[in-house]
Image (cartoon, grey):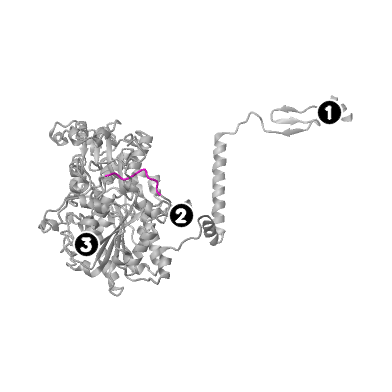
Amino acid sequence: MSFLRRRKGTGSSKSPNFVGSKIEDGDGKKKLFESPGKKWSCWDSCCWFIGFICSMWWLLLLLYNTMPASIPQYVTEAITGPLTDSPGVKLRKEGLTVNHPVVFVPGIVTGGLELWEGHQCADGLFRKRLWGGTFGELYKRPLCWAQHMSLDNESGLDPPGIRVRPVSGLVAADYFAAGYFVWAVLIANLAQIGYEEKTMYMAAYDWRLSFQNTEVRDQTLSRMKSNIELLVATNGGKKVVVIPHSMGVLYFLHFMKWVEAPAPMGGGGGSDWCAKHIKAVMNIGGPFLGVPKSVSGLFSVEARDIAVARAFAPGFLDKDVFGLQTFQHLMRMTRTWDSTMSMIPKGGDTIWGGLDWSPEGQSFNCGAKRLRNNSINNIVQNANLNLADNVKSVNYGRIISFGKDVAEAHSSKIKRVDFQGAVNSVKLPNLTTSCDIWIEYHEIGNHRIKAVADYKVYTAGSILDLLHFVAPKLMARGGAHFSHGIADNLDDPKYQHYKYWSNPLETKLPNAPDMEIYSMYGVGIPTERAYVYKLNSGTDCSIPFQIDTSAEGGSEDSCLKGGVFSADGDETVPVLSAGFMCAKGWRGKTRFNPSGIRTYIREYSHAPPANLLEGRGTQSGAHVDIMGNFALIEDVIRVAAGATGKELGGDHVYSDIFKWAARINLQL
């Protein structure tokens, strides 16, 4: 009753009342309370979210650095099962130790470059990496970075006031960026059987330069010669095992001719230098006959992934965004890199196919799902994925087609207008004055651009004419350093010139019958082989040609996706390019291999990682990730420890490379 009386009273017993941000209770006391009118702003949410992420990051970092080293391994093994020994540990248990010195030859892109002299915008960057590492300067000052990464458009050497040089030592290409290995895993496994820096050498070079210009400017070829001689002399006369990767394969092919050629053009080592110093050349992901991806890169600065990104944001990358026209800057920069010329497809229609044929014949099954690398029947099933009977045949010989209908129609039904006729036609005023970023397309005129599209289709035989038409400066420089044909007579004195030395179809292997050559590459990954293009409907200052991402094959297994035809390969180099020379061109005694150097093909069927804890996978066949492939690493270590190709088991092939090679009519 007393409670009811208090509730009914009018004295100090008052009902709670909201007053602004305060509450009056029954005793007349006021309490603070958040005003119902105040809202939680987006800015508050962002600050709290960022703070939460940072706090969690530092907490996890603290836990990671304070926990015993055995815990991460325990967690991993609890999820994936017991970890297998690395190749180095496994082979050390078998008794393998250091034998032959090892030389690594990195490829394009993967080698670090640092600044030794630059313009005012690059102050504070002396001996800092402009390429590789964190790429911090790319984000801070992109225009300055692009300027310093470019070479002179006339000479192909340093621009005035700029000196960018390759990083030296094993750190030059062990990691491309933090956490992204290139040679690091292979180096670590070699170290596990006793290798160290005195028995390993990274032949770093400036991968932007033409091969001969690396000697002209940096004496890189001479340094490689001297270091190989030193390794042999300080290791009891044991010959070296050379391991080139990607474009480094072509670079070392050039070196083997250079080192034996007389000075001043060559190194003056004599005709038996390779026989005395090299045990084996183990080429990883070698683009011996070039890659179609280089054509799309030079033609429109595109590849499959960039074309897809461009389709998601039409015109964005062509526009002036914060003063950076991305595609134009990339094209202007990369077209000064003469080394890209080395990877244009070699051998013309004889190797790559013509308007109505290609060596691969039936298409690769691009829609097949790759099995995880711990699947029981992984190898057997992956080996047969490209043999599906229901896959539609594709003519890969048409490397560039303007329109899907042109890519698929019979050549007799394609009406073509020769674009060369536009060279002598009246030239329209160029667009250089109205475009902020100059590229060669701005000078050729709209009528000539249309003439390129009217020619409809380009094979490997006409690609060079196309590039001469749209990139005359690049081709004028590159033509003096590289050649892409097939030699009629290798004894012709003209083939003693360095421009032919990186083309295996225009040069002879050295006279070294005891040497071995391996072609080691991944298979089972859809790899760019041909493209469907369209004219770009953007502004006059944009790049006028673009991969037509709307061109699709129409089925899940089709190899035409997003305007790109795919074939079997390692995601960058098609099997045809990586395997043909060791399968046929150099197999036995041929005019390209007169001393009969033994050749072996070692293919690695791609299997993606079983889980995130496995990183990039120990059975990957991808172009760079294959450097962490346990089977490949084991092959390399065994050869370095003294094994021969025969002792490895000879050829190890999953693809149809021997069948495709047989279809190529090449005089041997």
Tell me which amino acid carries mark 2.
Glu
Tell me which amino acid carries mark 1.
Ser
Residue occupying the far bottom of the picture: 236
| Magenta span includes 369 | yes
Q: Label 2, secondary structure: give it.
A: helix
Snapshot quadrant of residue 116: bottom left
Q: Residue at x 57, y 52 (%)?
A: 59
**Mark 2 crowd level (few <14, some 14–19, many ≥20, 10 Å Cα):** few
Is residue 130 at least partly visible in the picture? Answer: no
Q: Which residues are magenta?
A: 362-370
Predominant SS along the magenta part: loop
Q: State the separation of the CA atoms marked 1 and 3.
A: 104 Å
Q: Which residue is mark 2?
A: 614
Q: State the separation of the CA atoms marked 1 and 2.
A: 72 Å
**Mark 1 crowd level (few <14, some 14–19, many ≥20, 10 Å Cα):** few
Q: Label 3, secondary structure: give it.
A: helix
Left or right: 49 with respect to 87?
Answer: right
Q: Which quarter of the rendered picture does the C terminus lie within?
A: bottom left
Tell me which amino acid carries mark 3.
Met
Q: State the separation of the CA atoms marked 3 and 2.
A: 38 Å
Q: Which residue is mark 3?
A: 256
x and y percentages locating residue 172 in the rendered image: 35, 58
Q: Which residue is mark 1?
A: 12
Mark positioned earlier in the residue sequence (3 or 2): 3
Mark positioned earlier in the residue sequence (1 or 2): 1
x and y percentages locating residue 200 in the rendered image: 34, 66
Q: Residue at x 45, y 63 (%)?
A: 85
Between circles 1 and 2, the one closer to the viewer is 2
Query: In the rendered image of this protein, does residue 380 appear above or below residue 312?
Result: below
